[in-house]
Structure formats: C-alpha cells, structure tokens
Amino acid sequence: MIPFNKPYFSGNELKYIERVCHSTTMSGNGEFTKKCQAFFEQKYGFNKCLLTTSGTDALEMCAMLCELNPGDEVIVPSYTFVSTALAFLREGAKVVFADSSCESPNMEIAQIEPLITKKTKVIAVVHYAGVACDMDAIMDLAKKYHLIVVEDAAHSIDSFYKGRPLGSIGHLAAFSFHETKNISSGEGGMLVVNDERYIHRSEIIWEKGTNRAEFYRGMVNKYGWCDMGSSFLPSEFNAAYLWAQLEKLDDIQGRRKYIWNRYYDGLRNLRYSSVKQACIPDYATNNGHMFYLICTSNDYRTKLMKYLKDHDVQTVFHYLPLHSSKYYAKKHGDRQLPNCDMYADCLVRLPLYYELENIEIDHIVKYIMKFVEKNG
Ligand SMILES: *Cc1c(COP(=O)(O)O)cnc(C)c1O
C-alpha cells in the first residue's frame, strides 16, 4: 500500500536531540529555538518569529494579540481546519464564515466585503495548499476598514505571493510543523509578528504572561506577571528536531515540488474529463505541500478513492465545512456556502511525501487515468 503520508526524517534529529540532553537548557527559548527563529527571520524577512507547540497555539496567540471584545467579528473561511476559527472563538469573538471561490478553495475575495460590519476586527486568510490568496486585495480591504489580517500559513512554508513570502504580508501569521506539513517536529508551530506594534506583547503572551524573555536578554533585573498569556513555547527537544529538518529545507522543497509536477504533467489530459487539477494563479507559487484533484461529484470521488485503494493507493479528503459543523451550525444560521460544500464533497488528496518514489507516482497516475477512461 502506498500511504498518504510518511513524515520526513533528515537523519540529524537524534544527534541534535542528544545535544539537548547534554545541555543545561531543555525547556524553551534555548539554542535550537533561537536558531530556528533566526532561520525564518533571515530567510524570509519575517519581522519576529516565536516557535510554539503547535500551529493552533500560534493562531491562539494571534487571536490574543488582536485584543478582541465580546461581539467583535472575525471573517474566516469555512473550508479550513478547525483551529483557524477556534482560536478566535476562544477569545469571545463571533466567527463569520466566508465561502471559497470557484477556482480554488481559497476565500472568494468578492464575498468578503459584504460580510464586513462595524464589528469586524480581523480577516483570517488561509493559503490553501500553500497557494497564496490575493493578498493585495485583502490588504486593501484591511486598510479601508481598519482590520487586522492574520495569515494562517500552516500549508505555506516557502511559498510566495508576487515574490513576497507567505506569512510576511499580514500583520500576524501562523505556521504549523505538524507531521503532515512539509517540515515537521511532530507537533509544532510558529507565530510570525510582522507589525512592530505587536512584538512586545507577543513575547509576554508566549512566556505565560511574564516578561521573562526581556529578563533573559538582560533588559530587566527581575521578571513578573504583566499580562495574559500561556505556556506557548516548545521545549528544546522539539526545536532540535525542527532544526534538523530546516537544515534540509531546500532539498525537501525540491523533491516535493518535483513530485507535484510529475503528478501534474502525468495527469495533464484530465482537464477534459470529470476530474480537475488545481490552478495556480500567476501571482502565486506552488510549494509542493499538497496535490489534489476535484471530482465532479461526491459519488465520483468515493468511487475513485475506492478504486485507488483497490490498487494499493491511500488517498484522503478533508475539511468538513465548519459553518455546518455540529458545533457551529446553529450560530452560523442558514447562509449557504456552496463552493465550500463542493470542495468538501469533491476534493481528493494524493500521496505526497519526500520518500515517494517516481515509480509509485507513475503507478498512481496510471490508475487515475484508467479510472477516468472507464468512468468518463
Ligand atoms: C495543520 C493546520 C492547522 C493547525 O496546525 P497544528 O500544528 O496541527 O495545530 C491550522 N490551520 C490549517 C489550515 C492547518 O492545515
């Protein structure tokens, strides 16, 4: 069976973890944490990076930094992982779900403005599959209505919008290093603070509401309770694991993009059938995070997935619409989000991981073509 995912392993993870075992700092904010944060700040020009224990935690920090009051509204796509919405809901905000566009699972830009009210404070965008949303349009809206933009960049490491790294455009951004992402530390994430105004408070929230980070830098001679916060820092063990992966980032990205392109070329002729490929707008890059197909119906997808399973290929679908979830449906009401429902019903993801071999990709392509030839 070709699995859907296999976490990448660089070979240096254990060596670096051993170094942590023999060091005096095993908790957070030590050597490896600083190396990882500096890597992102230097490579992508992110203003300030803080490692977190998950992408969800990074989103929660974003939501705390937005200083939301009860009744404030946050616009979030419905076709995303729960955490994008949950982080803001926990802060007492009202989540207003937006639909995806027809061309891609990203939010439909034209549908955002009608959702903005006097109470809207934040737009949270998700760059689905690492393919950028039209950020100029989003930032223009934010300027016009004085909104904060949070990028959920969980899929988006090493991807770009008009040459600008994703995660560097909004006021705040969150990355994930969950084992299903391009770079992983098992569970892990990172907050990016681009807007200078949030930097001071972000460190305090990160360190359980204290100014311990300043204390470590020698800026104050004792530290204490200053604000809200939680324990958002990962241990040095996680950071050491992450560092072993970051060292190989270019290699990982090269292989993943190669696999993506091999699928894309192999399935080129599908454009005329019941299965569509992703389209990448001119302003966006592809970072090899995910390869997906969109079927014409839910029934077609079920049959295709079953057929591939019978030929030893594991595929998955994802994102049950959040607006009609058991937890939120009542609060959402009956405003329809048809494109979101369509992606939830019809999108299927193919295996994509570093170790996936060319003959395996060709096997998968062959059986998809066979299925489509038979079923139209
Ligand atoms: C993975 C993911 C998250 C959450 O990240 P974790 O590290 O698993 O907490 C949030 N948003 C999106 C879009 C994701 O894919």
Image: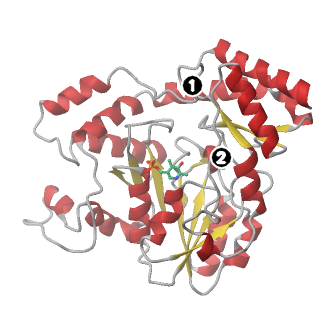
Residue 163 appears in view: no
Q: What element carries label 1?
A: loop
Residue 2 rendering spot, x and y as whole percentages: 60, 21
The one of 372 and 284 positioned closer to us in this rendering: 372
**Mark 2 to mark 1: distance in Å?**
24 Å
Image quarter where the N terminus lies is top right
Residue hosting label 1: 3
In the displayed structure, 115 sits above or below 99; it is below
**Could you tell me which residue is drawn at 75 percent across and 38 percent down?**
302
Residue 303 rendering spot, x and y as whole percentages: 78, 34
Residue hosting label 2: 131
Please rate how many residues cluster around mark 1, counting C-alpha atoms within 10 Å: few if below 14, some from 14 to 19, many from 20. some
Circle 2: residue type: Val
The one of 250 and 358 positioned closer to us in this rendering: 358
Q: What element carries label 2?
A: loop
Circle 1: residue type: Pro
User: Which of the two marks, 2 or 1, is nearer to us in this view?
Assistant: 1
Quarter-wise, where is residue 231 in the image?
bottom left
The one of 285 and 299 positioned closer to us in this rendering: 299
